[in-house]
Image (tube, rainbow, N blue to C red):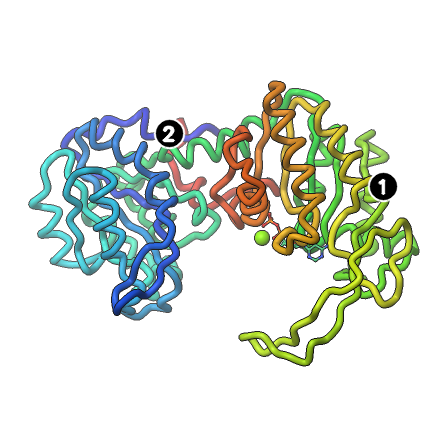
Amino acid sequence: MAKLTVRDLDVRGKRVFLRVDYNVPLEEKDGKMVITDATRIVETLPTLKLLIEKGGKLILAAHLGRPKGRRDATLSLQPVAVKLSGLLGKPVTFVDDCIGEKVAQAVAAMKDGDVLLLENVRYYNEEEKNDPAFAEKLARVADVYVNDAFGAAHRAHASTEGVARVVARRGGQCAAGLLMERELKFLGDELENPARPFVVILGGAKVSDKIKVIDRLLEKANTILIGGAMAYTFKLAHGEKIGKSLVEPDHKQTALDAEAKAKKLGVKFELPVDVVVATPVDTGKLNKKGKPVFDFTNVRTVNGNIPDDAEGFGVGEKTAAHYAEIIKGAKTILWNGPLGMFEDARFAASTNIVAQAVADATRQGAKSIIGGGDSVKALKKAGLGDRVTFMSTGGGASLEFLEGAVLPGVAALTDK
Ligand code: ADP
Ligand code: MG
């Protein structure tokens, strides 16, 4: 069902409670917390500017990190207010609480088009519990509710769901921000009736993480390309050797069922024909988390069985080239999950080849949609972030949405 968006709202003179995703990375420098990447703040500017132009009073709410229901000065949103003010070119009032008298007073003093940022909503345990009384307290300063935090929409928390319910009960409107609108369009509407051929690339670590997505996309895709460590579970299910590779033996049947379903539906289901492997050697050292550190030696490509001493780290060049050909013929592409352990340059080649193919297909007119936190990272690392149609900001939320789940933060918005 289509949801109301900020474009549909008349907010002049109204108090707009706007949930944003300002969960930015911070670093301590000379005793002060400094934002190391302001992308998430920059991305909200179009929604903010539109609502300012429309004459709303903007009350921004967000979470930062995991303060676990306590005030934690290192997780204050105060530096975000400073940064946002600079980016917007106008003052942003910061209130060091998200509920209570201080907030009510600051909001009462606002004029149309003013912007105010509340302190971290997770300073209260009630936020993640979606406590109804807490949601009422947040809603005290809300005539209208807008959610632009797609990345938090899979959680039913007070600021993502509860407060919207309160506003709606009072007859107020609840709308998607522009960022949220784009996520719903590309991960939702565009994949309902995709231009064909529709090619889905699925990689990443585990079959169990992605099986619901595979299952749902089997109903829609023409071709599914499998990569990443999840390919080893398929290999194992076929009776092949996978050496020391990451694998889920309990999910062999899951893998076989997916293949059978693909066959039944006439979906082409492609598995890697070659694998880049290496021999892990224990260095005897421990990392920060106390886990043993391995050196990966003797990097090589194998066809078929993976030797007992070796571990797979991605699809080989033959597979990558074959996948690239298929991708170049696509009209719609959905990519979720890297094809190998791209974080290590020795295993990034296949992911980069596929990323390039996605960019080439996009240039030829295909729509390319990238969901999943690590896939977006991989694409940016390959320098192709601006060469695709859409990159989701969602991470876990985009995965759940692709599975066909109803996200509580979306469900709470007003239907058109
Ligand atoms: P996304 O965040 O895009 O949904 P995932 O979280 O499912 O993707 O998977 C990403 C992770 O999978 C990456 O950290 C990558 O290193 C890892 N990975 C991919 N292929 C392999 C492999 N063959 N062996 C080990 N790890 C892999
Ligand atoms: Mg991930």
Label for residue 192?
Answer: none
Q: Is residue 65 visible?
A: yes
Question: Which amino acid, mark 2?
Answer: Leu
User: Which image quarter holds the C terminus?
Assistant: top left
**Residue 263 rendering spot, x and y as whole percentages:** 85, 35
Q: Is residue 5 above or below residue 115?
A: above
**Residue 192 rendering spot, x and y as whole percentages:** 60, 27
Q: Is residue 387 above or below residue 274?
A: above
Residue farthest along the left direction in this orientation: 109
**Residue 328 rendering spot, x and y as whole percentages:** 71, 25
Label for residue 260?
Answer: 1
Q: Is residue 234 above or below residue 6?
A: below
Instruction: Compute the Cα span from label 1 to label 2.
Output: 40 Å
C-beta proximity under 8 Å, tags 1 and 2: no
Classify residue 398 by image quadrant.
top right
- Residue drawn at the location 27% of the way across and 35% of the way down: 48
Q: Tell me the SS state at disc 1.
A: helix
Viewer-closest of 183 and 17: 183
Q: Is residue 234 left or right of residue 409?
A: right
Residue farthest along the front direction in this orientation: 298
Task: Report the residue marked by disc 2.
Answer: 4
Q: Is residue 184 left or right of residue 179?
A: right
- Residue drawn at the location 33% of the way across and 68% of the way down: 69
- Residue drawn at the location 58% of the way across and 41% of the way down: 382
**Residue 52 rendering spot, x and y as whole percentages:** 20, 32
Classify residue 297 by image quadrant.
bottom right
Viewer-closest of 79 and 223: 79
Q: Is residue 228 above or below residue 3?
A: below
Viewer-closest of 290 and 207: 290
Q: Tell me the SS state at disc 2.
A: loop
Q: Earlier in the sequence, mark 1 or mark 2?
A: 2
Q: Is residue 399 visible?
A: no
